Image (cartoon, rainbow, N blue to C red):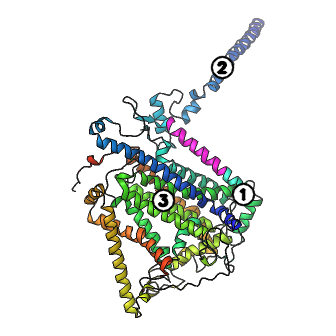
Amino acid sequence: MDREKEGRGGVGVLERVREETEHLRMRLKEEFEGLKQDLKEPQRTQLWRSIFRVPHERTTPRNRTLAVLANVFLHLHPARINRDAVRYSYTWGMGGISFYLFIVLTFTGVLLMFYYHPTKVQAFRDILYLEHDVPFGRLLRNMHRWAAHLMVITVWLHMFRVVLTGSYKRPREFNWCVGVILLVLTLLLSFTGYLLPDDQLGFWAVTVGTNMARATPLIGHEGPFGPQLGMTPYNDVRFALLGGSIVDSNALLRAYIWHCIALPLLAAIFMGVHFWRVRKDGGISGPAPVMLESEMKPVRKV
Amino acid sequence: MDWYQLWQIISAPDNVPIVGLLVIVPFYTWYGLRQARANDRLIQELEANPELAKTHHRKTFPYRPGWPTEVHVWPYLLRIEFLAAIIVTALLMVWSLTLDAPLEEPANPNLTPNPSKAPWYFVGLQEMLVYFDPWFAGVVLPTLIIIGLMAFPYVDANPLGNGYYTWRQRTVAIGSFLIGFYLWIALIIVGTLMRGPGWMLFWPGQTWDHTRLVYEVNRNLPDIFGITSDWGKGIFGFFAVVLFYLAAGFGIHKLVTRSPLNRKIYERTSLLQYLVFQFFAITILVGLPAKILLRLLFRIKYVWITPWFNI
């Protein structure tokens, strides 16, 4: 009885093991096939679908629309645009390039911040260190500087194009004003960055620049009605800008904070408003159908 | 010709953008105005042919009925944006690999470079210091430029030319902007290429002479008329400026109401809009060049002298 049991039990175990192995083998094969399938079509995996919420593989109009609207980085775009608006000749691409340069500047700027101390003792040496010892440090600094120069030019050209196409007209007047503020912020960003290497070039450029602040009417100690209002070199607007009466360590620190924190933050906010308004004001202005003089409507009396 | 010095100035890494502007600005002006001309031709054609105007798609680009008027952003716009990003990155890479950002000696408050110049985009303002006192050139003028730019869309009462290139329909608006834009660029170029030691004028290629003296005595406008008392100078200057504003305003008025279309636009302009336009046009677009000419041609420094400020 016991033997039989044991005997059958022994056979049973062997068979069960064989069955289980067979089962496992089939299972593995299935899993392997599945993996192969996933590699072939990663779009179908749970991982992919969790990241990209919209199927991209078939280019239906719906998918193309969702590809833009359901993506946080692309959603500032409309789903569709005027067929002629994609022509380079109309926009010159200058607004977009300015924005891209801002991103490049933020990226290279953050990397530069790792190597820079805004103090009179360290600043200049940090630039030397950056130029001679940091891997790709010189390239990094060059890119930051040239991107800044290029951004000033692209912002000017963007403004020029907007004037030539009359894109500031109703309903985009306010967005033009936001653009003017962004232009000023771009110039201020460039200007505050100029001082940071703490070399002769930056020092004297900023000295020349801030000396003009002395002459501010009412709030500068050399400006019209400044002295009459009690302005001295130690309490006027230039003092506030420099954190002192000369371009020194406080000025360096102030330029650094304006350059790396306050102005980029302000610029980012205004850029957000700028892009938002582009969409809300009906997207990019043209190329619109030409209007004829004979079609001018009589003046609207409000 | 001092080619070496000229080369040194234009090849200074920080001056590369200015040399670039010399090419880029004329190119984009031509590029924009060429499209404006094409549109103007189309406008003329449609004005002459009202029947065609009813059916025409009103662009210079090809279009046939039945073609979609819109395209998907993905991929038609996004591919251009990504391409632009790649091109700009490549350009920046090449620029950064070939040209090093300038780094001079450590800052030294005791050693003033001569000339010491502002960053290139502010050199235009520095150049204005020759013609105006710092409170005007450095503070009031930039403020006026910014406010003037912001006011620009609000004083332009012309409903035509919204969203397409045109010159004939918007001569005043585009003309004003072009004058201002070119003035700004011209001042930057003069300040960079033609200003040497002591901010003295040197032609491009003329050797910078650090010992040069200029035997020029600047005069004030009241002096020429033999006015010596402070009160007299103040009152004379005030009337000179008022007279200038009236004369320039009258000239501008004649200019902007010459063509029938501009007269129509003028009729749509409110008094406030027109006065704001006139103020900025007289002050920045006429006053600035006028003062520059007064100085360069007649050696006149101030027009209006008061105990508190001079213009």
Quote the CA–CA distance across marks 1 and 3: 28 Å
Q: Which of A31 and A161 is in front in this view?
A: A161
User: In this figure, which residue is indicated by the disc labeled 3?
Assistant: A182
On screen, residue A24 above or below B187? above
Using residue A36 as the reference point, say whether residue B290 is left or right of it: left
Q: Which of marks 2 and 1 is in front?
A: 1
Extent of the magenta region: B75-93
Quadrant, the C terminus of chain B: bottom left
Q: Residue drawn 51% across and 47% down? A: A93
Pick whichever of labels 2 and 3 is earlier in the sequence: 2
Subunit ID for the residue under disc 1: A
SS at mark 2 in the image:
helix
Quadrant, the N terminus of chain B: bottom right
Amino acid on which disc 2 is placed: Glu
Pick whichever of labels 1 and 3 is earlier in the sequence: 1
Subunit ID for the residue under disc 2: A
Q: Nearer the viewer, residue B130 or B105?
A: B130
On screen, residue B43 above or below A32? below
Magenta stretch: residue B218 in it? Answer: no
Percent coordinates x, y for residue A205 in the rendering: 61, 71
Q: Residue drawn 44% across and 41% down? A: A78
User: In this figure, which residue is indicated by the disc labeled 2?
Assistant: A33
SS at mark 1 in the image:
helix
Mark 2 closeness class: few <14, some 14–19, many ≥20 residues within 10 Å: few
Mark 1 closeness class: few <14, some 14–19, many ≥20 residues within 10 Å: many
User: In this figure, which residue is indicated by the disc labeled 1?
Assistant: A138
Pick whichever of labels 2 and 1 is earlier in the sequence: 2
Q: Residue drawn 56% across and 73% down? A: A209
Percent coordinates x, y for residue A140 in the rendering: 68, 55
